[in-house]
Amino acid sequence: MPETTVTEQTTFGQRLRAATDRFGPLCAGIDPHRALVESWGLTYDVDGLTRFTETCVEAFAGHVGVVKPQSAFFEVFGSRGIAVLERAIVALRDAGTLVILDAKRGDIGSTMSAYAEAFLGKDAVAPADALTASPYLGFESLRPALDLAAQTGRGVFVLALTSNPEGRTVQHATLRDTSVAESIVAGAAAENAAARTHGDLGSVGLVVGATVGSAVQELGLDLAGCNGPLLAPGVGAQGGTSEDLRRVFGDALPNVLPSSSREVLSAGPDVVQLREQAVRTSEHHAGLLR
Ligand SMILES: O=c1ccn([C@@H]2O[C@H](COP(=O)(O)O)[C@@H](O)[C@H]2O)c(=O)[nH]1
């Protein structure tokens, strides 16, 4: 039985801390891009998607702490693609590997309730441990997901400073001296306040790209004070390095999950090589981040 067996009695923040203590900080992405699937010698169809995903599950399950499937690459194939994603989520979680589903949901509260039920609810078909969410309809529009995640022991990662250069036009904007990103960090910090009093990592995380340069310092964001996990995409294929992570996150480094998809996946299709690449990448970041 793996030590990090998923139970709904613990919070997501507690399970995440246990997983990264054991396996290192890497969040390995499952992003079946057409070019990657074909470079693995597979056809870009549901059969190829299935083989690609099963290979990733075999390589990562029980060997990496956290895996992040990108929903878009499964949605491309309609209901059959979503079925592949659901099987992967179940298999990973059965092996004790935490799953962050990157679906970036966000809508008005009444619709957000349905998204929350679909991805985080106790009767969800294949619930992940955490879901990425977009706060650009207002942080409070995410309330149904935040509340349901808290009830079901799951997590939410809220987009704060995304890794793409276009993000800054919205996220750096200020209103009465407060930037959009700062208000999102404050929203997450408030959700994580109770966990902090118990000395635990909170379950409401932020997405902050490894590629955001000096934005965290320029905008005066207190990422360590947020007391939540910090999902950091942008390492590897988007050019971010461990050194960038140090510069971006400073004293918040212990809460950072470097997230890498294409850089790790390029080691496939051999299961052992793929697993070794993920484990090596996690060890590399662990050495530099801790
Ligand atoms: O700000 C963000 C938020 C999410 N992502 C997602 O992470 C991966 C990155 O893939 P790589 O191959 O490692 O570049 C992908 O699923 C993005 O949708 C992000 O890149 N930036």
Image (cartoon, grey):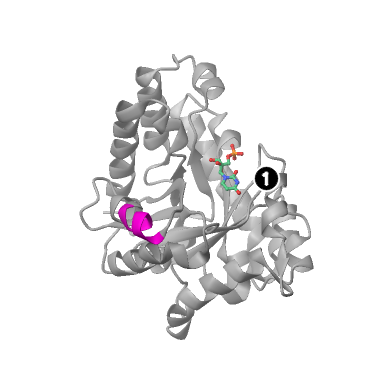
Q: Secondary structure at mark 1?
A: loop
Q: Pinpoint residue 220: horizontal percent, then vertical percent.
A: 73, 72
Residue 276 makes an appearance in the image = yes
- Place of residue 206 in the rendered image (x, y in percent of width and height, measured from the top left): 55, 61
Q: Which residue is mark 1?
A: 164
The residue furthest bottom is 197
Relative to residue 204, is residue 254 drawn left or right?
Answer: right
Residue 286 location, quadrant: bottom right
In the image: residue 248, left or right of residue 265: right
Q: Residue at x 57, y 29 (%)?
A: 266
State whether residue 75 is above or below residue 14.
above
Location of the C terminus (image quadrant): bottom right
- Assess whether residue 111 is covered by the magenta stretch: yes
Q: Residue at x 72, y 46 (%)?
A: 165
Residue at position x 56%, y 48% from top? Answer: 259
Which of the 4 image quarters holds residue 173?
bottom right
Q: Amino acid at mark 1?
A: Asn
Q: Is residue 34 above or below residue 281?
A: above
Instruction: Say if disc 1 is inside 8 Å of ligand 1.
Output: yes
Q: Nearer the viewer, residue 142 or 5?
A: 142
Q: Which of the two residues, 253 or 157, is positioned nearer the viewer here?
A: 157
Question: Could you say which quadrant of the image residue 53 lies in?
Answer: top left
x and y, in percent, of residue 248 in the image: 72, 60
Write the start and end of the magenta stretch as one range. Answer: 109-114
Residue 192 screen position, x and y as percent:
47, 75
Q: In the rendered image of this protein, does residue 136 appear above or below residue 274? A: below
- Visible residue check, residue 227: no
Q: Quadrant of ligand 1?
A: top right
Q: Is residue 266 left or right of residue 129?
A: right
For the residue pair 157 and 97, the one nearer the viewer reads as 157
